[in-house]
Structure formats: C-alpha cells, structure tokens
Image (tube, rainbow, N blue to C red):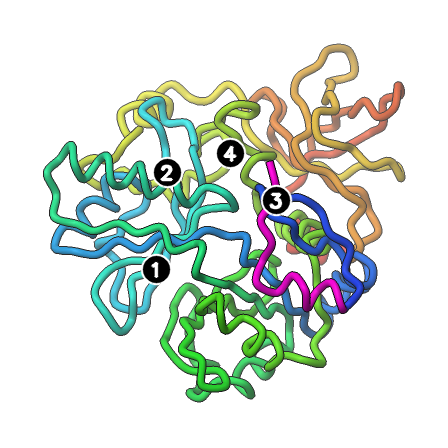
C-alpha cells in the first residue's frame, strides 16, 4: 500500500528530513537528531507536523448523545471551546482508539481526533451507531482536507501568541479557540503529546505551508522526538501500548481509568468495565526504570527473576535523564512502585524498578 504524504511533505524534504511510514503516512522521523529535537522541546520549543492524525466532525441535534454513547468520557460536561481525552471501546471494553474530543467554540458540533489511519473507521462507527439508534446527526471524516501542527515547549505560548491574531495565552489546558494565523482560520487548542505546555493547531490542509512558515525559526521536530517526549511523559501510543489485534487492553489495564465516567447512563463497553472494576484486572501497565544502560524494546519479556510475568510495550533511552525507560504490562501483584523486576535484553536479564509511569515527574523529583 502506498503511503499518504502530508501537505508539508515537500517542505520537509527540502529541509533534509528523514521519513518513515507511520499509520499509512510518510512522515518526518527526524530533521536534525532525535536528541537535538527532544532537547529543544524540553528547553525552548519545537514545531511538529502532525497532519497524520485523523479528524472527524459530528453535527446535528443528537451529536452529543451519539458521541457520548461511543466514548468513555462525558461530552455533556464540555462547554463550547472545551476538549477532553477519551477512549473508544468495543463491547468487551477493549480500546479501539484513544481520541481527543473538542466542542467547537464558535459553531455547533464536535470535532474528534483519532489516531493516524483511523478516521474512516471511526466515522463509519459513528454512522453505523447513529443509524441503529435513529439519531439525527451528520458525520464527516475530514482527515483528507485538514492539517495539524503542534508547537510544544516552555516558549510555545510566546511563539504561538506572536503568530495569532487573537491572544491565546490565557487558554486553559484542554480548551480551544478560533483565531487566525496569517489570515488562515485555525482552531488553536492548549493540548499536546509531549509533557510540555503548548498548542495543537487544526487548519485547512491547503494552508499548511502558510501556517508552518509562521513558526520559522522554531526547531522542526519529527516523530522520533515525539516518541521519546511522550514516553518520558508516560503517554501511551496507539498500536503499541494498546492495539485491538496485537495488544488488546481495556482502559483499566492501560492506566486510563481516569477517562472512564461510570456515572454516564450508558456507553459501549461499560458493562464489561463494570465487571472488570468489581473483579479486578490481571495485568496493569507500569513504568520501568532500567538500572543498566540497556534499552528494552517492544515485546521483551519482564520477569520476577524466575518466570515471565509481563512484557514491554515501549522503551527508549531517555534524552532528558540519560536513563533507559520502558512501559509494559505485568501481573497485578508486581505492579506496586518500588518492585524489583528483570527484563530480558539480548539474552541477558537486566535489573529494572517499577516507578510512576509519569517519568518526568518521578525522575525530576529524584534528581
């Protein structure tokens, strides 16, 4: 299958980016080096093309009711301009995708952002459920015509405010407003995937070059740095830390119980999660600090010294702390912070300690 190219592909190519296939998109993985780009986001600011993400718009009298049925969080709590992180589940409570839902600040309806390559699947899911329930909505997968750019880091607020027609510095986390950047109408949201302050900007794909140019001088960053940044922040990656086919997990196993609103009357997967909450989960995701200079990769076995009790889903050498870090699922009895475990790395077992998966907070406190 031929990979799709983002609207900024030629711009990235001229900038010397290296590319990789991700979710069916040919995306920049690095512009300079992962460490250079990572450090820019932690210390100043970095700019990401995230146009591989999907965008689905739901409008109509029953838009909120439909979206509430298909997501774990409660969209009825969203005021205009608010956003929330949520999950989409199957009937067994297994995560199909994690998304951010935005209630438009300036018009009726909702925008939700699934992961790369999931737009058509999610739009079809919304349409099918609307038809089954006879709900009055329109659902449109706008991924093809929409671009997204993220500006992240300590200097991101200043950088974005200098580019927007309206002040955005007072936006709270998980809120958004409509404004213009060089006469391009954009939805600017105080959201991100790096553990730093910053914004994600939704814009017409045809205007991507104009908006990208507004942040000229900020370090461009690829998916390599995005991955190390999100892992240090303990954020999960769809298709790796959970996946319907290769890593089927419920929110309660994946540490995402905080986005499940059990007070809602009904949502797909609720009954399965209620049963799981009552009986407990067999495995849970944990953060792992590796005590030797060895990187644990996806699929590596986690042991208690004798037996395999779990496996790694994500791992890297932390550019910020120069310590190998990993996420993985372990038997619940081994999930307490401070538990000493082993990870099989290249035919040897290295020592690892269970820590809070929000590594940024954990390791900064220890520094």
Which mark is first along the chain, 1 or 3?
3
- The quadrant where residue 45 appears: bottom right
Quarter containing the C terminus: bottom right
Q: Which residue is mark 2?
A: 88
User: Does residue 112 lie above or below 299 as drawn?
Assistant: below
Nearer to us: label 3 or label 1:
3
Q: CA distance from mark 3 to mark 1?
A: 28 Å
Q: Nearer the viewer, mark 1 or mark 4?
A: 1
Among the two numbered marks 1 and 4 on one chain, the one whose residue lies closer to the N terminus: 1
Label 1 vs 2, first from the N-terminus: 2
Mark 1 and 4 residues: CB-CB less than 8 Å, in contact? no
Determine whether the residue tagged by mark 4 lies in a helix, strand or loop: loop
Residue under circle 3? 3
Q: Which residue position holds label 4?
A: 254
Q: Separation of disc 4 and disc 2 at Cα?
A: 13 Å
Q: What residue sits 46% from the left and 22% below the top?
A: 281
At x 44% / y 68%, what residue is drawn? 204
Visible residue check, residue 365? no
> Tag 2 or tag 3, which sits nearer the N-term?
3
């Amino acid at each position: 299958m031929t990979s799709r190219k983002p609207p900024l592909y030629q711009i990235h190519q001229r900038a010397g980016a290296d590319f990789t296939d991700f979710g069916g998109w040919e995306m920049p993985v690095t512009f300079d080096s992962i460490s250079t780009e990572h450090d820019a986001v932690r210390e100043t600011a970095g700019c990401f093309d995230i146009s591989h993400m999907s965008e689905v718009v739901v409008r109509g009298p029953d838009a909120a009711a439909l979206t509430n049925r298909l997501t774990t969080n409660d969209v009825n709590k969203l005021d205009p301009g608010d956003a929330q992180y949520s999950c989409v589940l199957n009937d067994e409570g297994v995560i199909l995708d994690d998304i951010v839902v935005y209630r438009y600040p300036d018009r009726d309806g909702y925008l939700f952002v699934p992961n790369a390559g999931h737009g058509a699947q999610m739009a079809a899911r919304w349409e099918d459920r609307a038809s089954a329930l006879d709900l009055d909505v329109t659902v449109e997968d706008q991924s093809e015509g929409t671009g997204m750019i993220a500006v992240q880091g300590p200097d991101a607020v200043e950088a974005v405010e200098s580019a927007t027609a309206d002040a955005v510095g007072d936006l709270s986390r998980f809120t958004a407003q409509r404004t213009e950047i060089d006469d391009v109408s954009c939805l600017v949201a105080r959201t991100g995937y790096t553990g730093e302050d910053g914004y994600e900007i939704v814009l017409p794909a045809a205007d991507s070059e104009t908006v990208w140019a507004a942040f000229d001088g900020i370090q461009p960053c690829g998916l390599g740095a995005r991955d190390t940044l999100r892992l240090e922040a303990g954020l999960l990656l769809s298709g790796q830390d959970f996946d319907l086919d290769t890593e089927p997990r419920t929110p309660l196993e994946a540490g995402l119980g905080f986005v499940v609103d059990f007070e809602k009357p009904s949502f797909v997967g609720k009954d399965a999660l209620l049963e799981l909450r009552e009986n407990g989960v067999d495995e849970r995701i944990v953060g792992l600090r590796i005590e030797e200079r060895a990187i644990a990769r996806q699929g590596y076995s986690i042991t208690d010294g004798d037996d395999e009790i779990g496996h790694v889903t994500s791992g890297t050498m932390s550019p910020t702390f120069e310590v190998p870090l990993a996420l993985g699922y372990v038997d619940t009895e081994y999930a307490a912070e401070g538990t000493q475990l082993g990870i099989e790395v290249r035919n040897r077992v290295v020592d690892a300690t269970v820590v809070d998966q929000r590594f940024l907070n954990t390791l900064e406190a220890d520094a």
